[in-house]
């Protein structure tokens, strides 16, 4: 007989030290406090506050009414894979075929599949800090080791290629890129991308490029992918994206990845034994999103930029706080080190004393920052800034 299951925590080594997503946990806590009648203003959101576009919703409803509710091919319906490959080919200047695309249950699931297919036990994956909270966990779940390379605020969080080179070993399998960044909102500039590309080509290291916010960029800034500055990397790069942020479809759970066909085939095999296909209804809606009208996207980006400018203006009036200007996404990465308390303490005090919920930076790799989301109305942002201004004057 085997040993009985332990009730004192995970027995599997790769799960030790693995905690649930802090961003999801904080958002859940804020919602619970609101439901309990507390006047909490929630700035934790990692999703747009705009509704899914009407034509996309109609496509989902139509799929139900027309009984397109059965299993689909594991990697996604042919029309959606074709639309994704066409979009990426146009945007990146690299020709993709539908066979190089897999549709997954969100971009996080796509990343999970990437690392399960790419990594073996003992491999290493470079993660630039600050990082999206799930990158280290996704690497660890694949049996590999996340190797964190810090970036500096004074460098606008651009990776230092010399620091990257020092971190590389003969076990390095991949480098994760995220531009625009969650949590900083910063874009990787062209000079940095070219330098990173040279290292990847020289060392034969894979690039996993998370581009989920690539269309939520504030003019005059422009998002550039590493493949646009170095097309030769296409044979060793996986691009991850989805419809969640661009088309306000977080709950529809559709993400995708594109890369070398052999790797994509391995990801399809993994998916065939885990989730199988993503929801058929959501796939039809995603197809409508990718091939439909884009006017609402432009309106949303302009509104996000208006909110960004306002929250930066308000934060600039609080001498104890500072932040870099986000060029995309919908987050402000706020430096709270002058408060002389760890970010977790600051976030806890803001929640309990000012009733403003933010995400502490420890989960992103920094105890000196908190993440504020401006994916909420301007009225809520103004109220939240008023509360923090009063808190600064009485409690800091």
Image (cartoon, grey):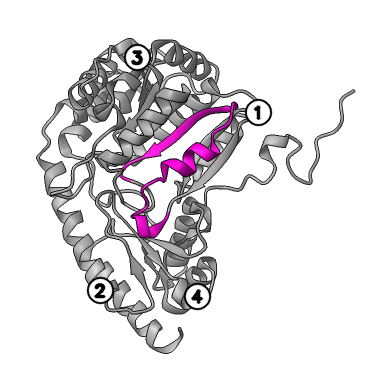
Snapshot quadrant of residue 256: top left
Looking at this view, is 363 or 155 the one in front?
Answer: 155
Snapshot quadrant of residue 324: bottom left
Q: Is residue 164 magenta?
A: yes
Q: CA distance from mark 4 to mark 2?
A: 19 Å
Q: Residue at x 22, y 35 (%)?
A: 57
* x and y percentages locating residue 119 in the rendered image: 56, 24
Q: Which residue is mark 2?
A: 314
* Mark sitting on residue 100: 3
Foreground: disc 3 or disc 4: 3
Label 2 environment density (alpha carbons within 10 Å; few <14, some 14–19, many ≥20): some
Disc 4 to disc 2: CB gap under 8 Å:
no
Q: Which residue is mark 1?
A: 122
Looking at this view, is 234 or 300 the one in front?
Answer: 234
Label 1 sits on a secondary structure element that is loop
Disc 1 to disc 3: CB gap under 8 Å:
no
Foreground: disc 1 or disc 3: 1
Q: Residue at x 59, y 26 (%)?
A: 170
* x and y percentages locating residue 36 in the rendered image: 47, 68
Eyeballing the image, is 311 above or below 147? below
Part of the protein shown in magenta: 152-180
Snapshot quadrant of residue 334: bottom left
Q: CA distance from mark 3 to mark 4?
A: 48 Å
Label 3 sits on a secondary structure element that is helix
Q: Which residue is mark 4?
A: 349
Q: CA distance from mark 1 to mark 3?
A: 27 Å
Of the residues under marks 1 and 3, which one precedes in the sequence?
Answer: 3
* Mark sitting on residue 279: none
Looking at this view, is 86 or 55 the one in front?
Answer: 86
* x and y percentages locating residue 185 in the rendered image: 31, 51
């Amino acid at each position: 007989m085997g040993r009985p299951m332990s009730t004192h925590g995970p027995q599997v080594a790769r799960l030790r030290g693995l905690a649930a997503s802090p961003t999801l946990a904080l958002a859940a806590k804020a919602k619970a406090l609101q439901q309990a009648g507390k006047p909490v203003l929630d700035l934790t959101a990692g999703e747009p506050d705009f509704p899914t576009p009407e034509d996309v919703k109609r496509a989902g409803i139509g799929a139900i009414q027309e009984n397109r509710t059965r299993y689909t091919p594991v990697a996604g319906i042919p029309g959606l894979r074709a639309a994704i490959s066409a979009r990426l080919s146009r945007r990146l200047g690299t020709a993709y075929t539908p066979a190089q695309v897999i549709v997954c249950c969100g971009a996080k699931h796509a990343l999970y599949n990437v690392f399960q297919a790419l990594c073996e036990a003992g491999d290493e994956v470079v993660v630039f800090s600050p990082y999206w909270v799930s990158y280290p966990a996704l690497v660890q779940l694949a049996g590999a080791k996340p190797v964190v390379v810090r970036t500096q605020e004074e460098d606008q969080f651009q990776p230092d290629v010399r620091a990257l080179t020092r971190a590389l070993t003969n076990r390095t399998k991949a480098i994760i890129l995220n531009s625009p960044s969650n949590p900083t909102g910063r874009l990787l500039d062209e000079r940095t991308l070219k330098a990173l590309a040279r290292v990847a080509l020289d060392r034969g290291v894979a690039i996993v490029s998370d581009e989920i916010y690539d269309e939520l960029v504030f003019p005059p800034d422009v998002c550039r992918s590493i493949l646009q500055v170095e097309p030769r990397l296409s044979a060793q790069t996986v691009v991850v994206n989805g419809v969640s942020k661009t088309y306000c479809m977080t709950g529809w759970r559709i993400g995708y990845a594109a890369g070398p066909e052999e790797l994509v085939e391995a990801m399809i095999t993994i998916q065939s034994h885990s989730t199988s296909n993503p929801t058929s209804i959501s796939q039809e809606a995603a197809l409508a999103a990718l091939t439909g009208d884009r006017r609402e996207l432009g309106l949303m980006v302009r509104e996000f930029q208006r909110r960004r400018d306002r929250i930066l203006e308000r934060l600039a009036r609080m001498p104890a706080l500072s932040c870099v200007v986000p060029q995309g996404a919908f987050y402000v990465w706020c430096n709270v080190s002058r408060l002389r308390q760890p970010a977790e303490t600051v976030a806890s005090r803001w929640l309990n004393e000012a009733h403003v919920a933010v995400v502490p930076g420890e989960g992103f790799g920094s105890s000196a920052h908190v993440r504020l989301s401006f994916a909420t109305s301007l009225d809520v942002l103004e109220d939240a800034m008023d509360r923090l201004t009063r808190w600064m004057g009485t409690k800091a």
